[in-house]
Image (cartoon, grey):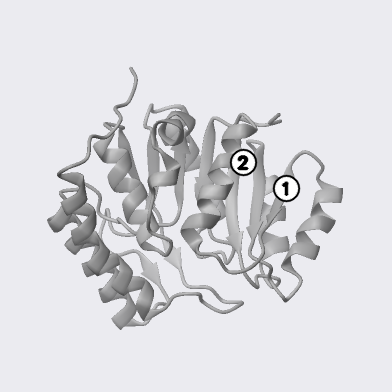
Amino acid sequence: MATSDSVIIIPTYNEKENIEKMIRVLVALEHPFDVLVVDDASPDGTAFIVKSLMAEFPERVFILERSGKLGLGTAYIAGFKWALEHGYEYIFEMDADFSHNPDDVPRLYEACAKDGYDLSIGSRYVTGVNVVNWPIGRVLMSYFASKYVRFITGLPVYDTTAGFNCYRRSVLETIDLDTIRFKGYAFQIEMKFTTYKCGFKIKEVPVIFVNRVLGVSKMSGGIFSEALFGVMRLKWNSMFRKYPKKQE
């Protein structure tokens, strides 16, 4: 079972330049956060690096190895199920490339563990546009994609595609994870929308997002297409679906 109340899930594909430094920073935080890496058969040796750190940090660092690139959403679903099986109360999503600042992890944790929220979001847009070193076209695409999602779905979240999140265990237990359909970055929209429809409390915590320095971005135009066109289907389906409700 868990040695901490919290686990940070990091999906990886070819992150050898970042993963060791990221894990070392996370396990050095004052609160004991465990780390689960979900690696999609990275050919660059990412998994080997993680395994060497598992020997150094037993009961703190873990890995799930998958057979290939199966999609961001399925990586997180696998990680969520593992975290629930191992008894964690607070379950994080985070990138390996330092676009998410590890120093913000305790702030997301406190929003749930101390302030009583069920989902805390590391938000780039709740206080404006807090993005560093992204091309302006990508900033605008991301920003207006979130505005579009808010308009279509009514989801009261400014950063709907944020990938830096902390879920309380009860959220993931209530949502039927096997019904989550999106596999790319639209997965983040579907998870937040479903959390909202189930009646859970959501808090956006302002963060500064910094574009990766090392490694190669996995973003593509197809990812945004999935988000934009899938949102209409998500909203349409929600009109005929009964969502499980948060247990008080």
Residue 14 shows in this picture:
yes
Q: Nearer the viewer, residue 50 or 101?
A: 50
The residue to which callout 1 is attached is 62
Between discs 1 and 2, the one toward the N terminus: 1
Asked if residue 106 is positioned above or below residue 234 in the image, the reply reads above
The mark total stands at 2
User: Which residue is depicted at the point 39% across and 57% down?
Assistant: 187
Percent coordinates x, y for residue 60 in the rendering: 74, 41
Percent coordinates x, y for residue 13 in the rendering: 62, 69
Disc 1, disc 2: CB below 8 Å? yes
Q: Quadrant of the N terminus?
A: top right
Asked if residue 137 is positioned above or below residue 123 in the image, the reply reads below
- Tell me if mark 1 has few (under 14), some (14-19) or many (20+) residues whose alpha carbon lies within 10 angstroms of its own: some
Q: Is residue 224 left or right of residue 99?
A: left
Furthest toward the top, the residue is 248
Q: Which mark is residue 72?
A: none
Q: Nearer the viewer, residue 139 or 231?
A: 231
Q: Quadrant of the C terminus?
A: top left
Q: Quadrant of residue 175?
A: top left
Q: Is residue 181 left or right of residue 38?
A: left
Residue 205 shows in this picture:
no
Q: Amino acid at mark 2?
A: Trp
User: Which residue is depicted at the point 65% across and 70% down?
Assistant: 15
The residue to which callout 2 is attached is 82
Percent coordinates x, y for residue 229 in the rendering: 23, 68
- Tell me if mark 2 has few (under 14), some (14-19) or many (20+) residues whose alpha carbon lies within 10 angstroms of its own: some
Mark nearest the camera among 1 and 2 is 2
Q: Quadrant of residue 19?
A: bottom right
Q: Amino acid at mark 1?
A: Phe
Label 1 and label 2: CA atoms lie apart by: 10 Å
Percent coordinates x, y for residue 172 in the rendering: 45, 36
